Amino acid sequence: MEWNVKTVDCYPTKEKNNNVIYNVHWQVSKTEGEDYLASSFGTQSLATDDLDSFIDFDSVTTEDVQAWVIAAMGEEAVTELEASLDAQIEEQKNPTTIQKSIGQ
């Protein structure tokens, strides 16, 4: 799975810290070969009640944010997300429905 976690919402100031990330807009995608792509997106709130290990915004990496999102979501939710992507790819490989236009 490939995560995009580059868009975040911040409190301008909280507990004397600037640009405190409290919400992440994420997109995750998974590919199989060159023909199949599945994706999902959402938002994840982050706890900001304990800022003892605060990282200055300019030093935050996408790896940091991805780890925070995964931790906040929980292992079960991440596993379900990956299963959903796998199901999307399986549906592309073996469609259970198709869309057609009448009269064209």
Image (spheres, grey):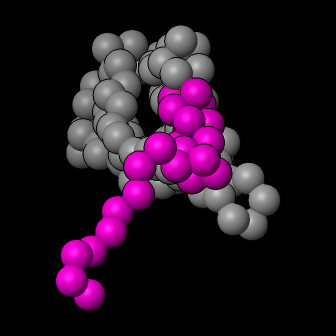
x 61%, y 42%: residue: 90
**Apparent side of residue 71 relative to residue 34 in the rendered image (left or right):** left
Whether residue 9 is visible here, answered yes or no, is: yes
Looking at the image, residue 33 lies above or below residue 12: below
**Apparent side of residue 41 relative to residue 60 in the rendered image (left or right):** left
x 35%, y 63%: residue: 99
Looking at the image, residue 103 lies above or below residue 64: below
Tell me if residue 53 is in the magenta stretch.
no
Residue in front for this viewpoint, 79 or 47 = 79
In the image as oriented, which residue stretches furthest toward the right? 33
Q: Quadrant of the N terminus?
A: top right
Q: Position of residue 23 (x, y in %)?
A: 32, 36
Res 102 → quadrant: bottom left
x 64%, y 51%: residue: 93
Whether residue 20 is visible here, answered yes or no, is: no
Residue in front for this viewpoint, 73 or 12 = 73
Start-end of magenta stretch = 81-104
- Counting every numbered tag in the picture gives 0
Q: Position of residue 57 (x, y in %)?
A: 47, 47
Residue in front for this viewpoint, 30 or 21 = 30
Residue in front for this viewpoint, 60 or 83 = 83
**Apparent side of residue 40 relative to residue 53 in the rendered image (left or right):** left
Q: Position of residue 52 (x, y in %)?
A: 47, 16
In the image as oriented, which residue stretches furthest toward the bottom? 104
x 29%, y 43%: residue: 10
**Apparent side of residue 20 relative to residue 78 in the rendered image (left or right):** left
Q: Quadrant of the C terminus?
A: bottom left
Q: Position of residue 18 (x, y in %)?
A: 34, 42
Tell me if residue 87 is in the magenta stretch.
yes
